[in-house]
Image: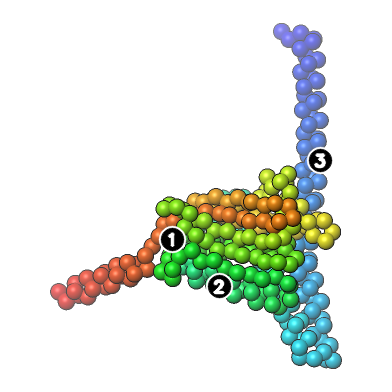
Amino acid sequence: MQTEEENRRLLQRIAAMEEDLKNLQGRMHNMQSVILSNISHDIRTPMNAIVGFANLLADESIDSKERNDFIDQINLNSTELLEKIDNMVDASMLQCGALKLFRNECYLNGLLDELYDTYRDHLEKSRKKLTISVAKGEDNGFFVVNDSRRLRQVLSNLIGNAVKFTGSGSVDFGYCRWNDSKIRFFVRDTGTGIDPFIQEDMFKPFQSRLHSGNDGINKGAGLGLALSKRLVELMGGELWPESVPGQGTCIYFTLPAEKNNRVKHKLQQLNLLTKRNIASLF
């Protein structure tokens, strides 16, 4: 039989566990409030810009140049809003294990050229004092087999993040063959850099204090980096930062270098078609 002392110790343990549970529930409630606040801010900021510039378009006194500028701002903020919503949906799908990859042939140089054109136009329309450049590590015949949509999403998240948090200077991105089995991509900026003490938390969802803006705090939802890291890992690679405060940041990630030669692929298709044509004669 349990002694009175054993019962007393058991009751103390139960009381301590109840107190820990209460504290945990409080922390979870506070975290939920912060997450909802950050998501609300992330959505409301571009939405307010869209509504504001749309209302300005109703002013008949504005000239055609101003009208075009307003339309550009509406388009920029609409794109930003859609990307944020896509990230939120994808993060939810990753959490419940519902996000699937679709492997296909991805033309790396074409993908990088497309992203370069997109962000060059973005910088011109936003009138931000930044230059952007791209480094392609292979000739025009280089293809890889992976999920091209998710690869584009990762690069777009990283480039967009670099552009957002770099006031002036440059943003560079590209890839190179790292070894026989891997390709290494990079996105480098000349921004404020990242404090070493918070680099471990950079890729956790909703960790918003990654960079310092004018007010010292980035109030974004903080999904882009976390989602990018998870997608890279799903595609068989790894992602990591290198940063020095005051000197900028470079985000690297690798992917398997499963190369699919375009010419060989076309020859295989032609060979199959020829065999089918011969077979049809009999």
Q: Which residue is mark 2?
A: 114
Labels 1 and 2 touching (C-beta < 8 A)? no
- Res 265 → quadrant: bottom left
Q: Residues within 10 Å of mark 1 (few under 14, many from 20)?
A: some
Q: Which residue is mark 1?
A: 145
Q: In front: mark 2 or mark 3? A: 2
Q: Is residue 136 above or below residue 38?
A: below
What is the C-alpha distance between the residues marked 2 and 3? 46 Å
- The residue identified by callout 3 is 26
Residue closest to the eye, 153 or 129: 129
* Label 3: how many Cα within 10 Å (few below 14, some 14–19, many 20+): few
- Figure quadrant of residue 67: bottom right
Q: How did the renderer colour the structure?
A: rainbow
Mark 3–mark 1 CB contact (< 8 Å): no
Viewer-proximal residue among 43 and 142:
142
Can you see residue 245? yes
Q: Residue at x 76, y 18 (%)?
A: 10
Q: Which mark is residue 198?
A: none
Q: Quadrant of the N terminus?
A: top right
- The amino acid type found where label 1 is placed reads Val
Q: Residue at x 73, y 10 (%)?
A: 2
